[in-house]
Image: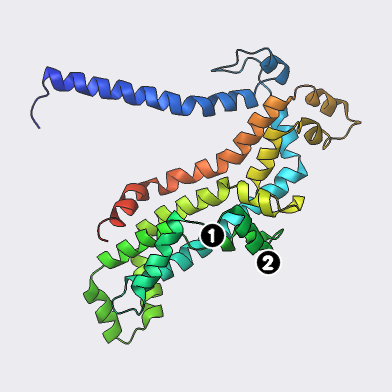
Amino acid sequence: MGKLTLQDKIIQICIYIILIILAIITLYPFWNTFIISINNAGDTANGGVTIWPRVFTLANYKVVLQNPDLLQSFFITILRTVVGTFLSILFTSAFAFGLSRKGVYGKKVYTTLCLITMYFSGGIIPYYLLIVKMHMNNTFWVMVIPGIVSVYNMIVFRSFFMSLPESMIESAKIDGANHITIFFRLILPLSGSIIATLALFTAVGHWNDWFYPSLFITSKHLYPLQSLLNQILATNAATDLMNVLSPGAQQKLKELQEVSNRSMAATTIMVVTFPIIMVYPFVQKYFVKGVLIGSLKE
């Protein structure tokens, strides 16, 4: 590379400044929420808590983590994310593999029907009536089965499968492998990047979803984390969370005095957000590679 000119250096400096500003704008709301979660609630009520806690305390986390509803919601969310992601990737990739093969009868019809669902839907009321008719409302599976196949992910999977050499699949057929064997023992092992990328997108979607569980689930023990967080943010839930602690313990009563609605909401947001954030560093290397591989051939 040649020596950078003054103009190139100025452009680089401007790019760095813009990126730093964007990073601060993106990260500051998360950081401020974290600071509020570890700051004394009475002090937070005075305002001005921005970059660093003035009165450090972990009372907010003690109250939140002792809430049995949150622990139950945490279990439901993890179970939903794991089961929902596994089934979605399995069925979506299998469907995409079928549509990527030459000579499949009605392939264009299936593809067209799938694409229509990306642009049109029956609406909330018909969808709700369908779920009720299938007796899935107020069950765990209402959070998993309706979204088990993603059309967008299917298109990405299919594009990737179509980019694989046809000679490789033909060689497997000559060796006596059927389509199921080819899919599980040949195609999936070669699809690590695209599977990791789409699995993360699917997992984040399951983890963050609160709307549909709020429509179809009335049993409190089936509420996922995001639906519980939505209730906390929308209602005055601090009193309910405080009741978890023994009213006779003086130390716990002192901790309760340090808790407010705002600090409870901030703490719950951190507890809900932190686990899914920790997943990103382990799959970050697959992002660009997986998405680009899936878009090479259509």
Q: Is residue 278 above or below residue 60?
A: below
Q: Is residue 222 left or right of residue 127?
A: right
Is residue 186 among what the camera can see? no
Badge 2 element: helix
Where is residue 110 shown, x and y percent of the image?
Answer: 40, 71
Where is residue 282 shown, x and y percent of the image?
Answer: 44, 47
Residue at x-position 62% and y-position 51%: 212
Residue type of the residue flagged with mark 2? Lys
Residue type of the residue flagged with mark 1? Gly
Could you say which quadrant of the image residue 127 lies in? bottom right
Quote the CA–CA distance across marks 2 and 1.
17 Å
Q: Which residue is mark 2?
A: 133
Residue at x-position 55% and y-position 51%: 206
Q: Is residue 273 left or right of residue 231?
A: left
Q: Which residue is mark 1?
A: 147
Is residue 145 among what the camera can see? yes
Depth check: 177 or 122 in front?
A: 122
Q: Is residue 257 above or below residue 96?
A: above
Q: Residue furthest right?
A: 248
Q: What label sits on residue 263 in the rendered view?
A: none
Q: Is residue 25 left or right of residue 207?
A: left
Q: Is residue 102 above or below residue 23?
A: below
Depth check: 285 or 294 in front?
A: 294
In the picture, which quadrant includes the N terminus?
top left
